[in-house]
Amino acid sequence: MKITILTICPEQFGDFQKTPLIARAVEAGLLDLSVLDIRDYAPGSFRHVDDSPYGGGAGMILRCQPVLDALEAVRTPLSHVAILAPIGKPYVQADAHRLAAMDELVLICGHYEGMDARIYPYADEIISIGDYILTGGELPAMVICDSLMRLVEGSMKKESTMEESFEEGLLEYPQYTRPADYKGQKVPEVLLSGDHEAIRKWRQEEALRITKERRPDLLK
């Protein structure tokens, strides 16, 4: 899978590219990750990528020309382009599965107060990772890359991604490890029983209970 990230803050991705999941995927040839600086496509010695909004208002806006020239430089017929901005559709696990199946993905990181609205039609979709505001789309780009690589075959054990929160429409059941008794807090007896059917039933019931308590909207 090829992922290209367009950003005005490429330095933010240095440590991210060294994280175990991403580094292993690159080393194994499962991921071709490129981070491009939008400023490289801005004219002049100062390489301005932003300007004041027409009509007035606080903050600065990403200009069309540098962003679209950067996109034109990397886009291919196989590219699926997503802009990361608060006005986008909320990102969910189903989107992770959908994007993980694509050959090439281009992520455009918004920044400042927003971007020139004439940029949006050049994207296939606009994605938001939540109903809150960040300084830019760099952190959302990392979130999306991480969520995708967990699903790409060969990057992780398949079993590790099958019973997680959201995969079956529920939150994940509680999990425990040693010691069986920590300061009086004991692991549920059923998990020590060796009865796999009883364990499966307990986990299903616990997933339903936790989802009802914390995310009843998912049960709809």
Image: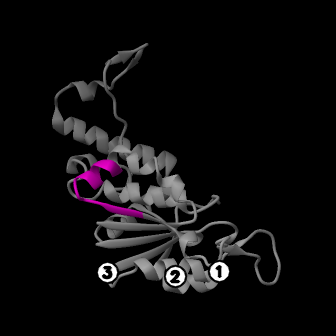
Residue pointed to by mark 1: 116
Front label number (2 vs 1)? 2
Report the side of 137 relative to 61 (left or right): left
Give me the residue at 58% from left, 78% from top.
66
Q: Which residue is mark 2?
A: 69
SS category of the residue bearing label 2: helix
Neighbours of disc 2 within 10 Å: few (<14), some (14-19), many (20+): some
Query: What's the magenta region?
Result: 22-34
184 drawn magenta:
no
Residue 46's x, y, as percent? 68, 70
How far separated are the C-alphas under marks 3 and 1? 25 Å
CA–CA distance between discs 2 and 1? 14 Å
Residue 152 x %, y %: 26, 59
* Label 3 Cα crowd, 10 Å radius (few <14 / some 14-19 / many 20+): few
Q: Position of residue 186 (x, y in %)?
A: 37, 20
Q: Which quarter shows the N terminus?
A: bottom left
> Which residue is under mark 3?
78
- Extreme-right residue of the structure: 56
In the rendered view, tell whether residue 61 sits above or below residue 157: below
Relative to residue 216, is residue 70 depicted above or below?
Answer: below
Going from N to C along the chain, the mark reached first, 3 or 2, is 2
Residue closer to the observer: 5 or 178: 5
Name which of mark 3 and mark 1 comes first in the sequence.
Answer: 3
User: What amino acid is labelled 1 in the image?
Assistant: Asp
- The local crowd at label 1, few if under 14, some if 14 to 19, many if 20 or more residues have their Cα within 10 Å, is some
Q: Are marks 2 and 1 in contact (CB under 8 Å)?
A: no
The first of marks 2 and 1 along the sequence is 2
Q: Between residue 115 and residue 49, name the one nearer to us.
A: 49
Q: Residue at x 54, y 71 (%)?
A: 40
Residue 168 at x, y = what percent? 32, 56
